[in-house]
Amino acid sequence: MPRSAPARAPITSPAAATVFTTVLTEGPVSRVDVARRTGLSSAAVTKAARPFIEAGYLEELASEGRTGPGAGRPANPLAIRPDREYFVGVKITGDDLIGVVTDLRADVRASAHHALTSHDVDHVVRALADLVGELLAGATPDGTSNLRERAYCLGVAVSGDVDRASGVVRYSPFLGWRDVSLAELLDEATGLTTTLENDVKALTVAEQWFGEGVGASSFALVTVGTGIGSALVVNGDLVRGAHGVAGEIGHVPVADGGPPCHCGGRGCVEAIASTEAILLRAREVSGEPGLTMDDAVTRARGGDEPLREVFAAAGHAIGLGLAALVNLFGPERVVVSGEGVATYDLFEDQIRRTFAVQAFGSAARCGLVIRPLPFEEWARGAAAVAIQSLFVAESV
Amino acid sequence: MPRSAPARAPITSPAAATVFTTVLTEGPVSRVDVARRTGLSSAAVTKAARPFIEAGYLEELASEGRTGPGAGRPANPLAIRPDREYFVGVKITGDDLIGVVTDLRADVRASAHHALTSHDVDHVVRALADLVGELLAGATPDGTSNLRERAYCLGVAVSGDVDRASGVVRYSPFLGWRDVSLAELLDEATGLTTTLENDVKALTVAEQWFGEGVGASSFALVTVGTGIGSALVVNGDLVRGAHGVAGEIGHVPVADGGPPCHCGGRGCVEAIASTEAILLRAREVSGEPGLTMDDAVTRARGGDEPLREVFAAAGHAIGLGLAALVNLFGPERVVVSGEGVATYDLFEDQIRRTFAVQAFGSAARCGLVIRPLPFEEWARGAAAVAIQSLFVAESV
DNA sequence: ATAAATTCTTGACGAAGTTAATTAATACTG
DNA sequence: CAGTATTAATTAACTTCGTCAAGAATTTAT
């Protein structure tokens, strides 16, 4: 049973959504410019923009004088008013909740953490409601009103199989949940309209609308850490997979006869490049079963060749996985990100080298962005999903 | 400069296209049924269907009496009239032209070959025009009129980088062509409206509309032979790749440190499982540099273990590539096909075994169809593209 | 026959966006 | 400094598409 999203922002037609998202993602743009970019008539843009301006979501900036021969009437750029509405995003991990408040542009305005002492559904729901209460306690950043009065939407990101439309966590290994109607429970507990999404997909939405993915019709996001996952956007749509599985770059086989993986396969990217796999191998190589990840990283940075090799092998596996992804999809851009922020320097070179060798033809021209990922970013992704729910309540 | 398609079939609105394609791909369906499946109102279906019936593209079948308590007015199923229009499809290979005439359902009604003695553009254009003339010389299969009077569209399939919208062959290694405006040349030479497409993509369209892909929102087609290629359909759209590259399953790296590939990489699927790679390896294994493919196949079938191993290794590589594809985008179905028809028995088992092991979770539930591919099928794919051009001239 | 069920058709209506004309605001020109 | 060219935004009439609601058509069951 799909739940309905609030309709405060006057989105009444496809054109309205198009105009609004264009201004949202492509910064201040004049009406004619929006028309040119979207293929709408300028009359349609004028009509669609008006209700947004009246509702305070968009504003008209002062026209910038322009120079040059035969310059005509200067444009009045339309701009988002980011403080018109705030959004709450929460990422649920196995150990804690990370929450943020963002504005309409998904810029983080406040954040807070909460430890989880149990995976019991009720406990998590209560903890999450508390966290939201805490986040919305103060006044708005611009000081003009109370935060709670201008926040209506909550986005929640969970790893696992999540059905966004119905707001149900189908299966979450980390939490040990099956078929939990989390969105419904949170609607009630928080008073906000909740949108649920898989964590990697949430991150991808944030990237697609407010990050590297802006303007790219197709791109991929890869996260490296405890697990290795990815999400793909093709023709502006997230690939969801017929059976709910998609973007499992972690289980792309890249080393024939390589180490066994949890999934039952062998030589999967994850079996070589996940945090766990790296640590396992590092202990093997160093002969110290008690070696910690921190130590391994320090020593590798210090020049310990065998350990450097372990990290390089992980980078190589990731590079091979990326090549597979890019050769199959040909995305315009790929963002590699992940929790293992601290160790990126040990990976990056090898990822790029392997990718450059194995990417086919002009596929290699795809922009490869490798970037550490602050943990809060996951929560921001959740907020981005909430923002998105404002426009595309039905179509997604 | 996109060229326009003819507008004989009265496709005037999205609804018209929806209704027509529904009847085309899902057999005889009543109007109410079309409405239910597409989400249109039944009134809209009635309106959209009328012009097609008047133009002879659709017909109303006699209502089948129905039984049961409280049965109402019986439905009048709408059906395609396949003989209303014929289409020509031609596949250009390095050595010859293969052409077919199909009806609206993409069923082959006639076929013909033509050897190519040169890759000179003019020569190919002339040969193709001759072939088309030959194909359209006779009367229609139903004997009521001349073929040429009921064929307006030509579809042409070429391997390489093809820009369908502009009808230009950007780069075709087999033919040694760069930036050839083939569609324009063929429009003139044949008098038909030509649509150009990459060969694998053409085959995929045929499969999507008239084959295994019917009803699947996402699926993939993989061809194995001289080269190894694939094409993906996501949300009903062919994935084209930002830089024109997509579906290069042949260059997915599956054997780390494996044999070098033309593309500069190592251990690509194609470097292990292409016809050429298999032959190379078979010669190595048997110690006979003059071994032919036919001999290798015969001996492997006869139980020659080392040679059987070579084919199994190829199947294994293909299985790994399929697992990569399926784990990344989770299609509903995958069709594996290709020129190497004769040798499928030596591959199939191993492909399935490896795929089953490496496919992640429920991704393994995707339907894997492995099927020989008559050579004519490529030409049929080209015809399917021509048929498709009738409806979606603009949107693709 | 009459009622109930289901399909198909019709015409009025409404939503959304286009075209074309109009108004607005600027820079260049003599 | 008026006049002209140029580009931006708005307005109003019109087109197009599809829905809605009512009704006609055609069957089975009572």
Image (tube, coloured by chain):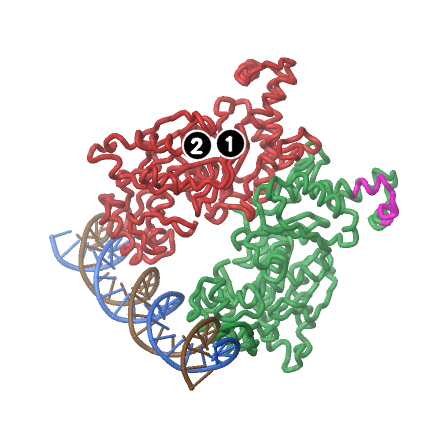
Chain colours: A red, B green, C brown, D blue
Pick whichever, B80 or A163, lies toward us: A163
Q: Is residue B220 above or below residue B29?
A: above
Q: Chain of mark 1?
A: A
Q: Secondary structure at mark 1?
A: loop
Q: Residue at x 74, y 60 (%)?
A: B117
Q: Secondary structure at mark 2?
A: strand
Pick whichever, A202 or A330, lies toward us: A202
Q: Is residue B302 visible?
A: yes
Q: Residue at x 41, y 29 (%)?
A: A97
Mark 1 or mark 2, earlier in chain:
2
Q: Quadrant of residue C17?
A: bottom left
Q: Residue at x 37, y 30 (%)?
A: A127
Q: Which portion, as a residue range, is magenta?
A: B298-311
Q: Chain of mark 2?
A: A
The residue pinned by badge 2 equals A92
Q: Is residue B136 left or right of residue A140?
A: right
Q: Is residue B194 visible?
A: no
List x then y, in percent, for residue D17. Answer: 40, 67
List x then y, in percent, for residue B284. Answer: 83, 38
**Does the magenta segment cover residue B310?**
yes
List x then y, in percent, for residue A325. Answer: 57, 40
List x then y, in percent, for residue A74. Answer: 25, 49
Disc 2: CA contacts within 10 A as few (<14), some (14-19) or many (>=20): many
* The label number, if any, that marks residue A174 in the structure image: 1
